[in-house]
Image (cartoon, coloured by chain):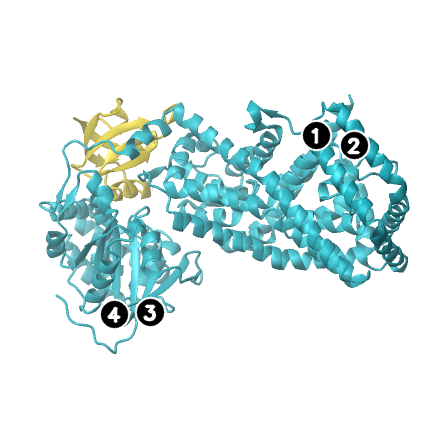
Amino acid sequence: MKTLNDLRQPGQRGEILDVTGDDAVAVRLMEMGLTEGAEIELVGFAPLGDPIEFLIRGYRLSLRKAEAARVTIDVL
Amino acid sequence: MTSAPSPTAGPITVAVIGNPNTGKSTLFTALTGIHSRIGNYPGVTVEKKIGKFQFNDREIRLVDLPGTYSLSPRSLDEMVSVEVLLGRQAEVGKIDVVVCIADASNLERNLYLTSQILDLGLPTVLVLNMWDVAVSRGVTIEAEALSKKLGIGVVPCEAHRHRQIDDVKRAILSAAGQSVIAPPRVFPPEFYEEGLRLQSILKGWGDPDVPFYVAERMLLDVGGQVETSFTARFPAQLPDELNCARERLKANGFRVPSAEAKARYAWVRETLTGVLTTPAERPATRSDRLDQWLTHRTWGLLAFAFIMFAVFQSISTFASPLMSYCEMGQQAVGEFVGSWMAPGPFRSLIVDGVIAGVGGILIFLPQICFLFLFIALLEDCGYMARAAFLMDKLMTKVGLSGKSFVPLMSSFACAIPGIMATRTIENRRDRMVTILVAPLMSCSARFPVYTLMIVAFIPNITWLGGWISLHGILFFGMTFLGAAIAIPIAWLFKKTLFRGETPPFVMELPGYKWPSPHIVLNRVYDRARAFVARAGTLIFATSILIWAASYFPADHSRQYKIEDQIDQMRATVQTELSQQVELEATQKALPESDTAERAVLEQKLADLQPRLEPLNKLIEEKNAISEHLLETSYLGRVGKTIEPVVKPLGWDWRIGVGVLASFPAREVIVSTLGTIYSLGGDVDESHTGLHHALQNSKWQDGRPVYTIPVALSIMVFFALCAQCVSTLMVIRRETNSWKWSLFTFAYMTALAYIGALATFQIGTWITTA
């Protein structure tokens, strides 16, 4: 099962399958647009590799690796 | 859809809501001008902002709600927006129209909130702001088509350019004429059935007034605020009821809570089909290109450090000359006023108390303004979010997140808005830790102390032709000392008092924009006004008290006689005095190397001395008396008593008293020292500035009081101590208890004492070893 962390090169894209869990963090991720079928693109990493910047639904979102690991995707 | 509003109708109440970074404040200001009232909703920390404007003979009341990504309340604070919208906030009343402001350049995510707003069934207007950004990205939106699909008014707008503002006003009026709208059916019918069922059950339990929206939230937000507050009222029955309802929905394929996001985004997709077109390849905007550098692993960090250093160096560079001008102004005012009065308590009160005291603080206004200007610029252009992104990893090392970074950055200007900004931190524990270390960030009120000490005692060595100075470096260093100490303290708090996991970091990086001069200048003006108001009230009152305590109970009659004599004698040696001032000024301007000219000037000065001798003797006598009177005053006695406590820090009784007096507001130290040295006669007529008085201050045995270690220890004390009643009050308000204010006061004072002690002892050991 691939997650957002499996996107390594800036410019790589994926299609979101699901967000694991039902807690506040999961809800937040979904509210921000990480739902099934949405396309997401890796933009870059912060110094030391964390957090990570993505492009989704037309805006830039930054997530930590820990949160990114919760989002399962299909790599495009 | 529309109907003409009745000409004799009353005011229309409009709530404004939207995602963060959509230009909501800009729109609010564009609609209302700057006439808005700010207050607080009772019992919570949410700010209540209400403005007014007139349009077509109607009065419109605008209520600004906090920016949010979703209307699913997870805390009491978030619940406030829902309550306001449902018309349940007594002071606001019924909402006639909701203005939902969206960022046209990323409409999908913005429409999530809109779909929740539509569920409320209130007349709504959708404002597509930042229309120009959307156009520059190649995004096209058919506003008319969208309006038809949603059944509400849709207005494109560029609030920052003041375009289409009247269109927004017209849309509001036309929406006001409507009756309630039918909410779109985003969820499957089973969900609405459960909602109605819940409503009637609650009615059966004695609560007939539950709006459908509240019932919706109760079902959808597992563990949310609505569920919590209703469970508190029906603890036995509600949990079971909700569980069963959710199980039934799950069986039907509607799994709470993830079902909401899926359903709403599906609705958004469907609504935008045929309405929104985006280019296949997203064009690289200027914003993207900037970000390539500014969020880069290496360059981003370097840029950040450079920006921070540049800000503080320029404050330091611009401050000195402006400060000198202000000081000269203060001296002139003091002399002018003094020359109109005979020596006596009243003249002393005005010159030594008020002018020396309050004036001493107003000198720093230019510095304060610069600092607030820089921070406002950084915030408004969108850079702060990048800073949070870059700093997040470091913040996690102490157990916080990048979200804590922005409030801490704001605290560099003033801890009060910084602490209020912690409301964006959802996790209570992390919010608490951020609040407790925010006062350690060197706020602008500390700058007068740093500047005074640095200008007086640190040699001004410069490099790179004046671009970098030792003063600037030290200023920068002292400012960040607090931040450096805050790191281990925050770590300690997170390990002991506020144990918990590192919070998640889910943050939008808004596009860069040109800072709006209107917003930035407004912010600077607000803060400057608060600063001057504080000077005019708290510091004024404290200065008077300090003056009184240092004036009485001594008998000043002999001092007045001498002052009279001095005044008379000055008149006779006017010409010599002005010559002396001129010569000294020329001497100052002369380079060190011009020994020939220097010798000539010194000779001329020496020639003047015999004529000035009697005057100088009188002044000396007056100073000696003044000093003695000061030591026997109430203030002096208190100072002498606490001297043993502060001596290990290298301070004499005057500094001790100054520090004590500055606990209500740290800037007071400058006024207090101003008063003490003025009354003690040390700020005499021929030397301007408190810093000269400090340089000449001596212990009984003739040693100078202020050595570099002493100056450093004073700065360290001020860097780490909580000397601000206003901050402690804000902490109390944000945490709803006195406990944490007292705790902050205690831990910071202890930290400051130890820090100052260590600095002085180690510093003296180094310089004398």
Q: Secondary structure at mark 1?
A: loop
Q: Residue at x 71, y 46 (%)?
A: B659
Circle 4 or circle 2, nearest the eye = 2
In the rendered structure, find residue B411 and report the number of the disc placed on it. none
**Separation of residues labelled 2 and 1 (CA atoms):** 10 Å
Q: Which residue is mark 1?
A: B590
Mark 3 / mark 2, whichever is N-terminal: 3
Mark 2 / mark 1, whichever is N-terminal: 1
Q: Which residue is mark 4?
A: B56
How packed mark 1 is, by other alpha carbons closer than 10 Å (few <14, some 14-19, many 20 or more), is few
As shown in the figure, which amino acid type bears the numbered disc 2? Answer: Leu
Which image quadrant for residue B599? top right
In the rendered structure, find residue B93 and report the number of the disc placed on it. 3
**Contact (CB < 8 A) between labels 4 and 2?**
no
Q: Quadrant of the C terminus of chain B?
A: top right
**Contact (CB < 8 A) between labels 2 and 1?**
yes
Circle 4 or circle 1, nearest the eye = 1
**Contact (CB < 8 A) between labels 4 and 1?**
no
- Residue nearest the viewer, comparing B35 with B277: B35
